[in-house]
Amino acid sequence: MLIVMHHSATDKDIAKVKSVITSMGLKPVAIPGAERTAIGVIGNQGWVEDAPLKGLKGILEIIHVTKAYKLVGRDFHPSDTVVRLGGNVKAGGKSPLLLIAGPCAVESREQLIKTALFLKELGVPVLRGGAYKPRTSPHSFQGLREEGIDLLAEVKREAGILVVTEVMSPEHVVAVAEKVDILQVGARNMQNFDLLKEVGKTRRPVILKRGLSATVEEWLSSAEYILLEGNPDVILCERGIRTFETATRNTADLSVIPLVKAASHLPIIFDPSHATGKRSLVSPMALAAVVTGAHGVMVEVHPDPEHALSDGPQSLHFREFEELQRQIMALEGFMKNLKEQG
C-alpha cells in the first residue's frame, strides 16, 4: 500500500498516519518528495484493509501496491539509487559507467596481483575474483576458499583497488565482509533466502546476479529480501538466462536492462562473459549493454586465459580488455552527447 499525503499535510498529520499503520501491525516507510510526502506500507502478507486510514487528515490518495517487491520498485522509491562502493566509486543514476574486471577464480597471489596492477593502471576501480566457486561438477576447481579471501584482502591493500567476491553460505558472510568491499550473490544462489537475509544485515554493497531461469519478478523479489534487512546498496547483474539455445553458454537478455530500469530504482550492470561463454562475443555484447543503458559492465580478465583454472574460454587477455575499455569509454561519451542533443 502507498499513501500519498496532501502537499499541505503537517508533520503532525504524517505522524498520525504512521501511528495508525503501526497499530495495524505494519511498518510505515516515509518517502519524501519535492512537493508532497508519500508513506509506504510494508509487512503485510496480502491485501491491506484501508478502512482505519480513511478519513485521516492530510491523506490525498491510498494506492494498493500488489507487486511482490515494494522497496525495490519505483512506486516506493521513484528516484534512482546511487550505490557508493568505496572512495569516489559509485554505481547508478548519472554516475560514470562502472567497470569491474578480473579472473573468474583466485588461483594464486601472482595471478591476482598481476591482474590488479594492470587494472589499476587502466583506472578500473573494482577487481573481481572468486574464492568460493560453485561448480556444476564436483571434480572442477572449487576455489581457494578462505585462502582466496585472504589473497583478495592482501591484493586490495597492495594495489589500492576495490575487490568483489561471491559468498555462497550465510555462515561465510560476516567473515568475508570484513575483508572485501563488495559481496556478490551468484546466479545459483539468487533464491537462497537465508543468504540474502544475511547479506542484507551487512553494510557492504551487494551485486545480485539473476538466476539461470529466473523471471524479472523473481529477481527483483530476491533483491527485496536484502533491502528488507536494511541494506539499500544492491546492484542487479544480468548474466544471461538458460534457454533451448546451446551455441552460447547462456542467452543474453539485454532487453531486461531498460525493462528493469523502468521497474526499479536499483543500478543494473551486465556480465557478458557468463552471458556468452565465448571470448569473441564478450566485447560486442559489453558494448551493446552500454547502448541499452547498463550502469556498468563486469568482465572476466586473466593474464593467461589458456591456462585458467576456471572459465578460460570466456576470459579476455589483457590486450583485449584494454581495447574493450577504450571502446567503452568512446561509446559512453557518444551516448552522453546523444542524450544531451536529444
Image (cartoon, rainbow, N blue to C red):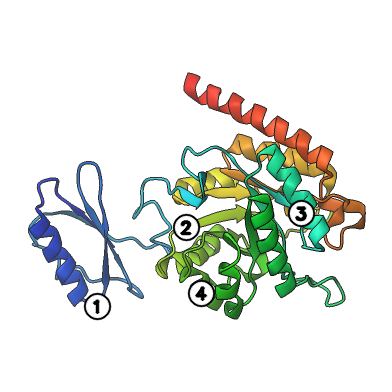
Circles 1, 4 touching at the beta carbon (< 8 Å): no
Badge 4 is on which residue?
198
Whole-percent x and y of residue 176?
Answer: 60, 70
Q: Earlier in the sequence, mark 1 or mark 2?
A: 1
The label shown at residue 68 is: none
Q: Earlier in the sequence, mark 3 or mark 1?
A: 1
In this rendering, is residue 83 above or below 190?
above
Circles 4, 2 touching at the beta carbon (< 8 Å): no
Q: CA distance from mark 1 to mark 2?
A: 27 Å
Q: CA distance from mark 3 to mark 4?
A: 30 Å
Q: Which residue is drawn at the image coordinates 43% and 58% (left, top)? A: 72
**Label 3: how many residues lie within 10 Å, few (<14), some (14-19) or many (20+)?**
some
The label shown at residue 233 is: 2
**Label 2: how many residues lie within 10 Å, few (<14), some (14-19) or many (20+)?**
many
Q: CA distance from mark 1 to mark 4?
A: 24 Å
Q: Which residue is drawn at the image coordinates 50% and 39% (left, top)? A: 95
Whole-percent x and y of residue 237?
Answer: 60, 54
Q: Earlier in the sequence, mark 2 or mark 3?
A: 3
Give the label, 3 or 4, closer to the camera.
Answer: 3
Residue 280 seen in render? yes
Give the label, 1 or 2, closer to the camera.
Answer: 2
